[in-house]
Image: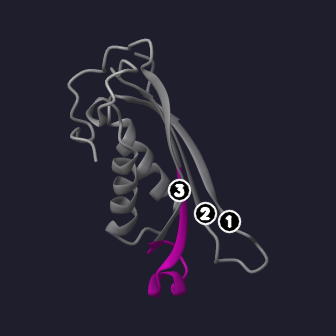
Amino acid sequence: MSDTIIGTAAKPPRLSPAGRRKIFVRELELMAHVGVYEVEHRYEQRLVASVDLDVVDAYDGTSDRLAEVLDYGTVVASIQRIVEAEHVNLLETLAERIAQTWLDDLRVYAVRVRLEKPDILPGCGSVGIEIERSRPAR
C-alpha cells in the first residue's frame, strides 16, 4: 500500500503531463450490516462495491514508484473499513461516506460509487445505487 495517507496532502499536487488518471475497483465483494428491515439488522449480507476515482497527481510517467500514485490497495482497504465499521440503514448513506472519504484526499477531484445488494430481492441479479460526486473546481 502507498505511504500516503488519505487526505494528508496540504495542497493539490501540481499536474504533470501524465498526472491525470482514473483509479478503479470493480465488484469488490464484502459482507455488510446494511438495511432497514429486521432481517437486515440480524444478519450480514453480501454487498458488491465498485468505485471510480478521477485523480490528479505528480506522477511523471517514469518513476515506477508506488509512492508517486494513489494505490488501489489503499482504496480497497478504505472501502472495507467504511463498510465494516457499523450497521447503516441506507446504501445511500454508505455510498456518501465512501465518496466523501475520497474527496477529502486532494488528489481526487471526482468519485463514482456503485453499491449493489445481489441477494436481497428474488428474481433480481442485484439492486442498488450509484452516486457521482466531485469537488468544486480549483
Q: Is residue 38 above or below residue 51?
A: below
Q: Residues within 10 Å of mark 2 (few under 14, many from 20)?
A: many
The kind of residue tagged 1 is: Val
| Segment colored magenta | 31-50
Magenta region includes residue 2: no
The kind of residue tagged 2 is: Glu
Give the left or right position of residue 21, taking residue 71 as reference: right
Q: Is residue 16 above or below residue 115?
A: above
Residue at (30% x, 19% y) in the render: 13
Q: Answer whether labels 2 and 3 touch (C-beta < 8 Å).
A: no
First along the sequence among labels 1 and 3: 3
Q: Which residue is mark 3?
A: 92
Disc marking residue 44: none
Q: Answer whether labels 1 and 2 touch (C-beta < 8 Å).
A: yes
Q: Residues within 10 Å of mark 3 (few under 14, many from 20)?
A: some
Mark 1 secondary-structure assignment:
strand
Q: Give coordinates of residue 9: x percent, y percent.
A: 23, 29
The kind of residue tagged 3 is: Glu
Q: Give coordinates of residue 131: x percent, y percent.
A: 57, 45
Q: Give coordinates of residue 82: x percent, y percent.
A: 36, 59
Q: Is residue 21 above or below residue 29?
A: above
Mark 3 secondary-structure assignment:
helix
Q: Is residue 95 above or below residue 85?
A: above
Real-space CA distance between mark 1 and mark 2, rounded to the nearest whole angstrom: 5 Å
Q: Of tags 1 and 3, which is closer to the observer?
A: 1
Q: Which residue is mark 1?
A: 127
First along the sequence among labels 2 and 3: 3
Mark 2 secondary-structure assignment:
strand
Real-space CA distance between mark 2 and mark 3, rounded to the nearest whole angstrom: 11 Å
Q: Which residue is mark 2?
A: 116
